[in-house]
């Protein structure tokens, strides 16, 4: 490994620790146990999410619904040709060429797909 890369990886492998946080009242918290406790309470209590847009129940149901054949076809159709391959090593052109085989292939993909 060359020197700049070695330096980068050594720097990024160092453990990062939050040294202090400021409480709601403005007090500086520096004790590591108290910092951890405050951060945990803040996340669980929802302070970090205050003011963020919320998804309605109806939108949530749509987002959690299984991927439809129409959505998949639309997504593949919107891929730009000539782009670099994705993580699977296959280009957008490859997926667009699969549409030649018709809907049967994509139905099989949807049945086998496991989405988080």
Image: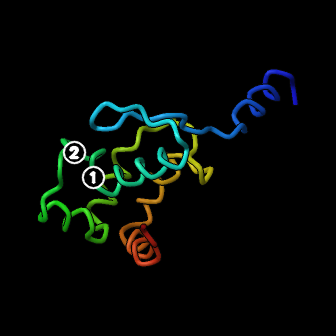
Q: Residue at x 87, y 25 (%)?
A: 2
Q: What is the spatial separation of the Cα atoms under label 1 and label 2, in whole angstroms?
A: 6 Å
* Residue corresponding to mark 1: 46
Q: Are marks 1 and 2 in contact (CB under 8 Å)?
A: yes
Q: Residue at x 41, y 59 (%)?
A: 99
Q: Which mark is residue 29?
A: none
* Picture quadrant where residue 63 is located: bottom left
Question: Where is the C terminus found, in terms of image quarters?
Answer: bottom left
Question: Where is the N terminus found, in terms of image quarters?
Answer: top right
Viewer-nearest residue: 45 or 28: 28
In the rendered image, the vertical position of residue 54 relative to residue 24, given as above or below: below
Count every numbered label the image shows and give the total. 2
Mark 1 secondary-structure assignment = loop
Q: Residue at x 44, y 37 (%)?
A: 29
Q: Is residue 60 left or right of residue 7?
A: left
In the rendered image, the vertical position of residue 71 relative to residue 91, given as above or below: below
Question: Mark 1 packing: few (<14 Cα in 10 Å), some, or many (20+)?
Answer: few
Viewer-nearest residue: 77 or 36: 36
Residue 59 x %, y %: 16, 60
Q: Residue at x 58, y 51 (%)?
A: 90
- Residue found farthest to the top: 4
* Residue corresponding to mark 2: 50
* Picture quadrant where residue 22 is located: top left
Viewer-nearest residue: 114 or 109: 114
């Amino acid at each position: 490994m060359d020197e700049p890369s070695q330096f980068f990886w050594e720097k990024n492998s160092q453990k990062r620790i939050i040294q202090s946080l400021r409480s709601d009242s403005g007090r500086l918290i520096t004790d590591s146990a108290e910092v951890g406790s405050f951060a945990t309470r803040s996340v669980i209590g929802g302070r970090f999410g205050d003011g963020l847009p919320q998804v309605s129940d109806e939108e949530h149901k749509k987002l959690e619904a299984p991927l439809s054949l129409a959505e998949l076809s639309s997504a593949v159709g919107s891929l730009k040709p000539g782009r670099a391959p994705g993580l699977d090593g296959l280009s957008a052109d490859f997926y667009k060429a699969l549409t030649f085989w018709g809907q049967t292939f994509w139905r099989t993909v949807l049945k086998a797909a496991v989405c988080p």
